[in-house]
Every structure is written in C-alpha cells, then in structure tokens.
Amino acid sequence: MLKLTFEALEMLDAIDRLGSFGRAASALGKVPSALTYSVRKLEEDLDTLIFDRRGYRAALTPAGKLLLDEGRELLQHASRLQSEIAQTAKGWETELRVALDAILPWSWITPHLDAYFKEGCLAKMRISEETLAGSWDALTDGRVDMVIGATGDVPNSALFSSQPLFDVKFVYCVSPKHPLARANEPIATADVTQFRAIAIADTSRRLPLRTTGLLSGQDRLVVPNMQAKIDAQIAGLGGGYLASWFAKPYLKSAQLVEKRVDTPKPEASLALAWRSNTRGRALAWWRERLRDAKPPK
C-alpha cells in the first residue's frame, strides 16, 4: 500500500523550490543519492513520473505539479495544526469570536486590538457586529465567545457571566430641515409620535426582537446599521436617539440638531459578557483589559 508521507511531500517541495536534487539534498541534510532513490521509489509506487529530468533544472511533470500543489496544502494544514496544538497546550484559544454591539463605534475598539496584537496574544480574533437582542442571541447560539457592549437584561444568568463597561447617554437628533428642528422644547411625546423614527434592525435570530427609543403607533424606518441610521436622520427621513458619541461630530458640524423631549430615553448600561463555561487566555486578556475601559469620546 502506498504511504505518501509528509516527509516525501517536504522532499518534493524542496526539489521544486531549489531547482535541483543536489541543492534539495543539502537543504534537507541528505546525500543526493538517497534523495534520488526516494523520488524514484515514490514514482514507482505512483506509477508515474513526478519530475522531468531532461533539462538543467528539475521540472515537475503535470502529475507532479498536481501532487505537489495538493501536498503543499496538506503541509500547511499540518503546520497550522501543530501550532494550534502548541497554542492550546499553553492555554490560548485558537480563535476568539467577538460580537461588538452596534452601540459602540469601531474606532473605540481599535486601540484595544492594537494592544492585544502588540502583546503577542496568540488567539486569532474574529469580530462581528450585532444589534440589540442580537448580541445576546449570538452568545446564546454559540456564534461568538464574547460580547462587548451588550445591553438589556441577561437572557439566562446561569449560562452567562458579565462585567460592567460604562453607561451610554442618548441624544434625540433630527436634521436641521426636519419639522421638529423648529419645535419648542421640550417637545411633547405626542408631537414626536407624529413623525417617523429611524431604527436599527435587531440582528437576533432566535431570541425575541427588541426595539428601543420607539413610541407606540409611531411610523418607523428600519435600517441595517448605525451609519445608515445616522445618514437617514441627516437626510431628514426621520428622527431618533443616538448614543452621545455617535451624535457629537454631527451636532458639531450642524448636520444634526439635538432636541429635548419631555420623556427622554434613559441612559443604558453596557456590559462585557461571555459564556460561563468558556475558558482561555485570550478571553481573560479582554476581561482584564476592559475592566476599567473608558467610553468613546
């Protein structure tokens, strides 16, 4: 039975890269005759030529190229597997999957990511965005290992652990050309209800969908992400609450105006959350890093 070993694949790879049996033998610490014998034995086992030896440089035949192309993928996979085994043995996850809630801007997490990579943390990072109940849903469903910026009540406190981040203040904003931009303050709830609200779609797949900052009977335009919400409000398509850190630059540039309402949206507490049975040095790093994290400016 043919046994195509990783050693044989490494041998073929060296011959192809270095262009000759002699240089490959030297690089592998073998004598050229032993390398030549190994290749001929492999060719006999496969009943096909792997190298065309007629020229100055050892060239792969079409069959040899196919073998080496597929073999290199196996070598890369084996190398990754060895690294991941060593990484796991040291207590590192192979990958940490994180949901960043849409309530937080991407610019807020980048300095933390920079510190993570500069400190040589080994787990790969995979970051997705979730909104409202979607953050808890992603954690419940096992799509992520950790959520940053989760809001609302913990769905099942027996399954999850959490630690507080900071609070978020909300600002009701409209375009300067929106009718409410000229309304006397504080604006009555009944007056706000007459105009369309811009809301972000909840990304939950299984947990009940949530809404926030919407009034009963109010028309609404549901958009896919935070930037779409901001753009829609700037365009005068409706009003809505924005986290103060999202609203600030647009209020400063006068693309949006802040309006006081008689029933303002209360501040919300953001949390870092993870599954209680999750362990690993990457998760521990983020828990410690964000223990005293400052809110976006």
Image (cartoon, rainbow, N blue to C red):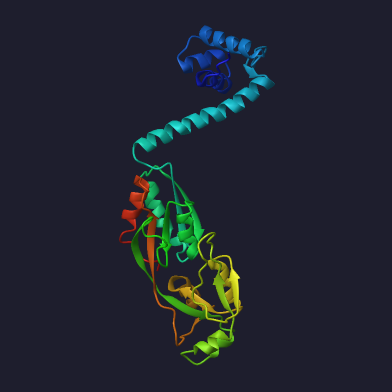
> At x 55% / y 11%, what residue is drawn?
38
Q: Image quadrant of residue 264?
A: bottom left
Looking at the picture, how far across and down is residue 82, in whole percent? 43, 31
Identify the residue at the far bottom of this view: 184
Task: Classify residue 108 as left or right of residue 66.
Answer: left
Regarding residue 186, the answer to whether it shows in the image is: yes
Q: Tell which of 75 and 116 is nearer to you.
A: 75
Q: Tell which of 22 and 130 is nearer to you.
A: 130
> At x 38% / y 49%, what residue is drawn?
116
- Rendered view: 278 above or below 295: above
Q: Tell which of 51 and 132 is nearer to you.
A: 132
Task: Classify residue 203 as left or right of residue 46.
Answer: left
> At x 61% / y 12%, what residue is drawn?
45
Looking at the picture, how far across and down is residue 207, in whole percent? 50, 62
- Rendered view: 1 above or below 89: above
- Rendered view: 217 above or below 157: below
> At x 45% / y 88%, what residue is drawn?
262
Quarter of the figure with the C terminus: bottom left
Q: Image quadrant of residue 95?
A: top left
Looking at the picture, how far across and down is residue 89, in whole percent? 35, 35
Q: How many marks?
A: 0
